[in-house]
Amino acid sequence: MNKPENPDNEPAANHPNNSKDSEESLIDFPCQLTVRVMGENCPIFQQAVVEIAQQHDPKFCAEQHVKCRNSKTGKYISVNLEIYATSKAQLNALYQALGDCKQTLWTL
């Protein structure tokens, strides 16, 4: 596996392409974002995801901001959450909470 080029042999965290300024400039806050969460198709998972979204976005309304899609076999479900993101810290906390949920397989 090839590593990204770093001609100055700087640590990755200090490399210009990995600066906090670069990360923060990718998204202009506040904004509406879609977060996709995949897990086993069970009511517990769906309810947990909605509760987490409500904790991190006070304007979140499940009836308006949730779209679900089952896998071909019906074993898994993809839950799309329309989130009003106000900061990078809020978004990071949301992804952390979703990832900490036992039923979550992955998030995008």
Image (cartoon, rainbow, N blue to C red):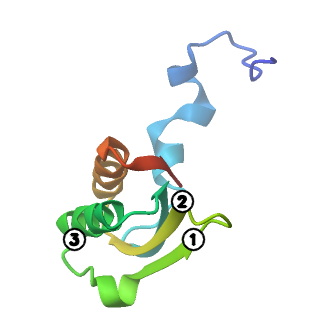
Q: Earlier in the sequence, mark 1 or mark 3?
A: 3
Contact, mark 1 vs mark 2 (Cβ under 8 Å): yes
Residue at the farthest top position:
9
Q: Are marks 1 and 3 in contact (CB under 8 Å)?
A: no
Name the residue type under label 2.
Tyr
Q: Secondary structure at mark 3?
A: helix
Q: Residues within 10 Å of mark 1 (few under 14, many from 20)?
A: some
Kind of residue indicated by mark 1? Asn
Question: Which residue carries the number 3 mark?
Answer: 54
Q: Which residue is mark 1?
A: 70
Q: Quarter of the image holding residue 45?
A: bottom left
Residue type beneath disc 3: Gln
Q: Which residue is mark 2?
A: 76
Quarter the N terminus occupies: top right
Distance, label 1 to label 2, CA atoms, is 6 Å
Q: Nearer the viewer, residue 65 or 89?
A: 65
Q: Looking at the image, is mark 2 or mark 3 nearer the viewer? A: 2
Kindly report the distance in space between the C-alpha atoms of the residues bearing marks 2 and 3.
22 Å
Sequence-first tag of 2 and 3: 3
Q: Nearer the viewer, residue 9 or 47?
A: 47
Q: Position of residue 60 (x, y in %)?
A: 27, 79
Q: Nearer the viewer, residue 82 or 48?
A: 48
Q: Using the image, determine if residue 91 lies above or below residue 54.
A: above
Q: Which tag, 1 or 2, sits closer to the chain's start?
A: 1
Q: Secondary structure at mark 1?
A: strand
The residue carrying pointer 3 sits among few (fewer than 14), some (14 to 19) or many (20 or more) residues within 10 Å by Cα, namely some
Mark 1 or mark 3, whichever is nearer to me = 1
State the image coordinates of residue 39 (x, y, percent, origin top left). 46, 55
Image location (x, y in percent) of residue 37:
47, 59
Lateral position of residue 35 relative to residue 103, left or right: right
